[in-house]
Image: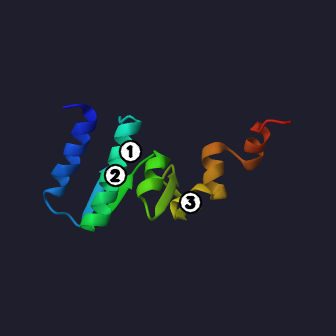
Amino acid sequence: LPYGVRKVVELGRALCTEPRLLLLDEPSSGLNVEETDDMAFWISDIKNELGITVLMVEHDMSLVSKVSDRVVAMNQGAVLATGTPREVQNDPGVIEAYLGSIDDVSSLRRKP
């Protein structure tokens, strides 16, 4: 089976035990854009249709934003921010940790 299909099969196998909590470690790792979109659909469906709580570790913020109600952003084991995906993405501490200081980012903007 192709890798993306195997990831979906793994997800299905985990659901066979009818869990109340589903733990996912980097579910989009190694997937292309289309497969990642499919994974987002499956995770959302599991949450919404089956009522299963999903706890995942993921670096793909696009996927996180599509499927998460709450996000905890961490850096080297320390919690940087918690909230909705939008709140966390706009948190100054998160921006600084991942992009550098606001001054660093501002200096990268094109000057007219």
Q: Badge 1: how crowded within 10 Å, few (<14), some, or many (20+)?
A: some
The kind of secondary structure element at disc 1 is helix
Q: Which quarter of the figure has residue 26?
A: top left
Check residue 41 in the rendering and tell me which mark sits there, or answer none.
2
Side (left or right) of 75 relative to 34: right
Toward the viewer: 12 or 23? Answer: 12
Side (left or right) of 60 relative to 10: right
Q: Position of residue 16 (x, y in %)?
A: 13, 56
Q: Residue furthest left?
A: 16
Label 3 vs label 2: CA separation? 19 Å
Toward the viewer: 72 or 6? Answer: 6
Residue found at x 19% / y 44%? 9
Toward the viewer: 25 or 34? Answer: 34
Label 3 vs label 1: CA separation? 19 Å
Residue found at x 49% / y 48%? 61
Q: Earlier in the sequence, mark 3 or mark 2?
A: 2
- At label 3, which amino acid type do we have? Arg
Please say if 70 is above or below 28.
below
Q: Which quarter of the figure has residue 66?
A: bottom left
The kind of secondary structure element at disc 3 is helix
Check residue 37 in the rendering and tell me which mark sits there, or answer none.
1
Judging by the rendered image, the residue that carries numbered circle 3 is: 86
CB under 8 Å between discs 1 and 2: yes
Please say if 56 is above or below 47.
above
The number of numbered badges drawn on the structure is 3
Residue 26 seen in the current view:
no
Residue 95 seen in the current view:
yes
- At label 1, which amino acid type do we have? Asp
Q: Position of residue 91 (x, y in %)?
A: 63, 59
Q: Earlier in the sequence, mark 3 or mark 1?
A: 1
Please say if 42 is above or below 70.
above
Q: Position of residue 97 (x, y in %)?
A: 62, 48
